[in-house]
Amino acid sequence: MAESAPTRLIDPCNRHLNYLRVSITDRCNLRCMYCLPQESLPRLSHDDILRYEEVLRIVRVAVGLGITKVRVTGGEPLVRNGVYEFLLQLSVVPGLIDISLTTNGVLLKDNLHRLQAAGIARLNISIDTLQPERYRAITGTDVFDRVWDGIRAAEALGFHPIKLNAVALKGVNDDELVDLARLSFEHPYHVRFIEFMPIGKSRWAGRPPLLVPEIQERLRVLGELTPVPRSEHDGPAQRFRFKGARGEIGFIPAISRHFCDRCNRLRLTASGQLRPCLLSDLQEDLRGPLRRGCEDAELAEIFLRTTRHKPSEHSLAGGEPAHTCCQMRSIGG
Ligand code: SAM
């Protein structure tokens, strides 16, 4: 594997941006209560969505500037046609050392071999409950068993790490936090608890938050959580382990203890907008210049400009409401 470029993506707060999250679609096969409102929202047209070759070109430019980690997300990435061929092409981009996928797991079980063949070993799977009926209530679809079978099959095939993401929702799944965390004893899973973020419109907006300190308090019954040393490519999760556990516990305290000071991310939306912060509507258009036939140098300049404009912290950290007009499904979470 070729050596990665030293990063030129250093923002005014001296944060080294080496991680690009790439949303390849705004389509999803679930309608999670914390992600979408009741009413249906307009979707991007086929033409608005970046073609795979456009995404790959942008990634190559980003890698030339020092991006070494890419996470493919959505919407639900596995619903997009051609995704496995795309992942394969992504996995051979010289200089990328970490490629992972975030999925709701609905289409996982039957496609694990294709993911493996495409060079994906690291999976984040969203699962907010272990109860099938509750899963249906949260996501609008009765597919808990299918998702759980996919997770078990991924474990059997040696995918590692398998990170299970649960958005903590007061009055919905807070009585299951311990059960979810207990999975880390029986399986090598990294169970991660995410605070709800008020992004775009959703059926959960305005509800009382369930924050990480309270989650940690509830998990005390399982023993003491020992911190796991951070590594270079760690995202915002605070990592811990219970004594004797095979897996880990992670917390993503987006609101209660924001992690902006060590944010190393840029986000590419499905429509080709480059965003320096999940919780801000600042964005730079890459699709327009790309389709007008620009040189790579112009794309690189857009990356550098976006980096220069990365907010020092998100507005929620200062107690203000989020001003994102975009939905999570088009930014990619
Ligand atoms: N469809 C894929 C999935 O379900 O994992 C990828 C896209 S989804 C937008 C990425 C992650 O964002 C999921 O773990 C989901 O639970 C999380 N998410 C969505 N809306 C959220 C919100 N308002 N607050 C916190 N996390 C959210």
Image (spheres, rainbow, N blue to C red):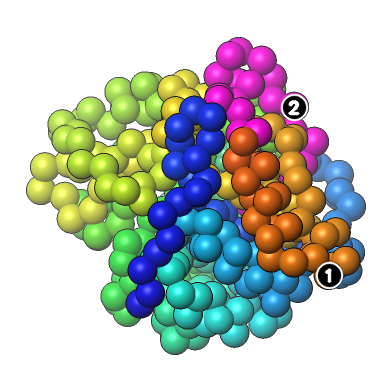
Amino acid type at image mark 1: Gly
The x, y position of residue 214, in whole percent, is: 38, 22
Does 263 sit left or right of 246 as displayed? Answer: right
Does 167 sit left or right of 189 as displayed? Answer: right
Q: Say if 312 sits above or below 68 in the image.
A: above
Q: Are marks 1 and 2 in contact (CB under 8 Å)?
A: no
User: Which residue was labeled with disc 1?
Assistant: 293
Q: Say if 203 sits above or below 286 in the image.
A: above
Instruction: Classify mark 1: residues with Cα within 10 Å, few (<14), some (14-19) or many (20+).
Output: few
Q: Say if 196 sits above or below 100 in the image.
A: above
User: Which residue was labeled with disc 2?
Assistant: 323
Ligand 1 within 8 Å of the CB at mark 1:
no
Q: Magenta region's main secondary structure?
A: loop
Magenta stretch containing residue 331, yes or no?
yes
Ligand 1 within 8 Å of the CB at mark 2:
no
At 27% from the left edge and 47% from the top edge, which residue is drawn? Answer: 231
Q: Say if 152 sits above or below 275 in the image.
A: below
At 44% from the left edge and 28% from the top edge, which residue is drawn? Answer: 261
The x, y position of residue 35, in whole percent, is: 67, 44
Where disc 1 sits, the SS reads: loop
The x, y position of residue 216, in whole percent, is: 31, 27
The magenta segment is 309-333
